Amino acid sequence: QLQLQESGPGLVKPSETLSLTCTVSGGSISSSSYYWGWIRQPPGKGLEWIGNIYYSGSTYYNPSLKSRVTISVDTSKNQFSLKLSSVTAADTAVYYCASSSVFGNWFDPWGQGTLVTVSS
Amino acid sequence: QTVVTQEPSFSVSPGGTVTLTCGLSSGSVSTSYYPSWYQQTPGQAPHTLIYTTNTRSSGVPDRFSGSILGNKAALTITGAQADDESDYYCVLYMGSGIYVFGTGTKVTVL
């Protein structure tokens, strides 16, 4: 069964670019059945969808973050990545990666999440 | 910007029934929004409960059920148990590859 695992720096300086990678195991990221997505949760707050990517490279972004977000896929490594530019303290959050079924538009499974703190 | 609204909190007695809702700031929720529901306990990743309005995810107890009630998606917990005390989030698919999470509901069982 699919398993997802986030990795990347836990501390990013303001104005810099946050970069995270999600490694997929138990299945192929080139599957036509899934989108691959990023979701975040600031401390003590709710969940926010960031964006999705299809194995072909098609991307879909939250309009409120679109100008700062890039999601890419590396099929050779079975990974997909998130870049969020010009970060501020408001971008401090637990970042989750998840797969999203093309047949029903739900998120499952989820990675365990990784906390990224934006601070100088 | 579309807002998906949920009740901030609910309290339910053990063995009781509670219905959480998921609505749109403008318009009605239908099955075309593919509503899904997630349970989250502190420090843990969300766990899928319900997808495509009313399909229970594998291993989810049948005390959890999903539906459309009026103009909202709904999650009903029938026979609440202590370990149902969690935060619950809905997600709606808005079309064109866009998703919006609900504001979340904190459920207390006491």
Image (cartoon, coloured by chain):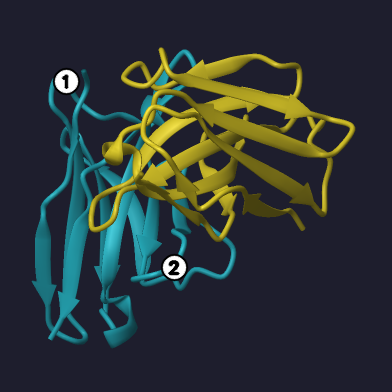
Q: Of the residues under marks 2 and 1, which one precedes in the sequence? A: 1
- Quadrant where the C terminus of chain B is found in the figure: bottom left
Q: Residue at x 43, y 18 (%)?
A: A68
Question: With respect to residue B13, does B89 lie above or below?
Answer: above
Nearer to me, A80 or B60: A80
Measure how far apart labels 2 and 1 are at the Cα level.
32 Å
Give yes or no for contact between labels 2 and 1 (Cβ–Cβ under 8 Å): no
Chain identifier of the residue bearing label 1 in the image: B
| Residue A98 x, y percent position in the rendering | 58, 45
Look at the numbered disc 1 and give the secondary structure of its residue.
loop
- Quadrant where the N terminus of chain B is found in the figure: top left
Q: Residue at x 16, y 37 (%)?
A: B70
Q: Residue at x 78, y 36 (%)?
A: A29
Query: Left or right: where does residue A43 sit relative to residue B62?
Result: left
Query: Left or right: where does residue B6 sit relative to residue A62?
Result: left
Q: Amino acid at mark 2?
A: Gln
Which colour denotes chain B? cyan
Q: Amino acid at mark 1?
A: Gly
Disc number at residue B27? 1
Are labels 2 and 1 assigned to the same chain? yes
Look at the numbered disc 2 and give the secondary structure of its residue.
loop
Which colour denotes chain A? yellow
In the displayed orientation, state which residue is furthest to the front: A120
Query: Left or right: where does residue B59 sit relative to residue B79?
Result: right
Asked where in the image residue B25 lies, by quadrant, the reply is top left
Disc number at residue B44? 2
Nearer to me, A87 or A113: A87
Disc number at residue A46? none
Q: Residues within 10 Å of mark 2 (few under 14, many from 20)?
A: few
